[in-house]
Amino acid sequence: MSLAVPIAYNGSQTSLYPRVLKNRHDNSRCEKFAEWICSRESLFRFGLDVSGWMLPTLIGGALRNKYSFYEALFQTGLEIFGMGFATSFTKLASKISALLHLNQDDRKNFSNFVLFGLNDLESAEKMQSSASRILTEETNDLNFLAGMSSELSPAKAQKINDRIDDLKKFFTNFKSNPDQIERIKKFKRSMILIDSTFQSVLWGGYMFYNRLFRKYILGQDRFTGTKAYIDNEESKKVGDSTPLSWIQKIGIGFSMFSAPLVNFCLFKYQDSQKTPTPKNSWLQMIKNQWDVTHGFYPKLGLLWSYCFLPVTLGSIFAAQGKSELIENVLTQLTMGNSWFFGHRVTNGLLAKFADNKISKQHNVEPGILVDPEYLHHPFPEPAKIQHVINRSQASPGLEKQARKSHANVLYSGFLLHSSFVLAIRLLINMFTKWRVEKSIAK
């Protein structure tokens, strides 16, 4: 039998989560923290970034020399700044875009219009249907967050509840018209392009800023990764002390504005297609992933253009010599893939194993700890905590075990992910040492 419980907004009850949260006091602190991390995509991605990038970077730098460690600290600081202010950048971009494209009556509701996906803006009927879906999804998630926040900060919980009231007032009686839809579409695309400019300047210049830190703060005008085993003269011999060339400067500038350029071209390409629902899988991915979720957080497509593409290009052009260039390419090939898909190899497989165990033990259908869309995928997407609670709430014993298994999967997966990435980083460090010492010996 299936434990899937449909959720519908009926005006009096917005979520099943407050009923389930009454059992939360029985959970351990580790379980509560895991649920908090997994409650929103942004928090989950932050956890992935800490385990799959920051910690391996810091440990890898510390095991080399103090200068590499200082650079790793600086890079980690840039990442924390970028992630900490990412939502603020997006909100600022949305306010600017609202001034450019929305009329005076709609500007005060810009944060609600952001919740509509670009796919929702194809017709008035589809937008009307999406309004009901958004109200249900957002109020469910926000109710869940309010319940969790009430334990730590009643003021924050009240702020979330105020937001829920605002959503109800806006979406319950929402009506759209063709002119408004066109304005909202321009507003959303403009918001994405403006936001991608902010993000691209930060992430496209990521390694360039690190190089400035290296030269003007650390006083090292060379690649510091090899400093433990070759001196400055030997560094010049192997080409690890080269100044920025004009080609690199142009490339760094391009990297810092690559995201809005790519996004603009993809939107134009999408507009050139005649069918609103293309059969082409590439176009389908653009339609689905080049957007934001929960209002102000980019989906995977935008994460790729906002962050991964500018960082990759910038790390190539800003490299100081062959050793750093090779390292940056190898690092981006491995770290980038691990950031986007590594959690499915670690957390996903662990979730699938735990899900099969729970479903057999309680005689229910699989799909509690795994996203049902990926249930038969070899590397599935682990389910968010809201889904876990929704699918297990019919039985207190099942719910308790599912929530405990969810926490175990999250921590074990992050630990494995971090260990694998650290091992790859250390192998890259060893490869650089072997290559440079071989070059010096010639």
Image (spheres, rainbow, N blue to C red):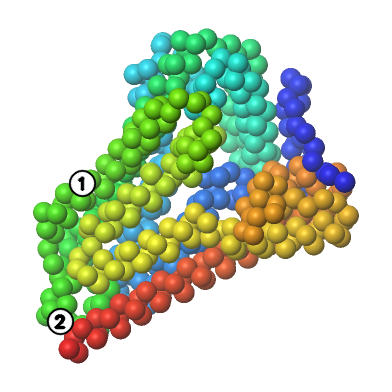
Report which quarter residue 305 is drawn in: top left
Side of 344 where 245 appears, left or right? left
Above/below status of 282 relative to 69: above
Above/below status of 238 relative to 121: below
Judging from the image, what secondary structure is the residue with disc 1 in? helix
- Residue under label 1, please give it: 253
Side of 378 where 202 appears, left or right? left
Write the residue at 73% across / 25% down: 9
The circle on residue 195 is none
Amino acid type of disc 1? Gly
- Residue under label 2, please give it: 234
Q: Position of residue 244 (x, y in %)?
A: 13, 59
Q: Residues within 10 Å of mark 1 (few under 14, many from 20)?
A: some
Q: Position of residue 51 (x, y in %)?
A: 50, 62
Of residues 9 and 120, the one drawn nearer to the viewer in this rendering: 120
Outermost residue on the bottom side: it is 441
Write the residue at 78% across / 60% down: 356
Side of 147 where 116 appears, left or right? left
Write the residue at 75% across / 50% down: 368
Report which quarter residue 437 is drawn in: bottom left
Amino acid type of disc 2? Glu
Q: Quadrant of the C terminus?
A: bottom left
Q: Residues within 10 Å of mark 2 (few under 14, many from 20)?
A: some
Q: Position of residue 205 (x, y in %)?
A: 26, 50
Residue 165 appears in view: no
Above/below status of 24 relative to 378: above
Q: Position of residue 137 (x, y in %)?
A: 65, 32
Of residues 62 and 345, the one drawn nearer to the viewer in this rendering: 345
Judging from the image, what secondary structure is the residue with disc 2 in? helix
Residue 421 appears in view: yes
User: Counting residues from the N terminus, which is met first, the one under dot 1 or under dot 2?
Assistant: 2
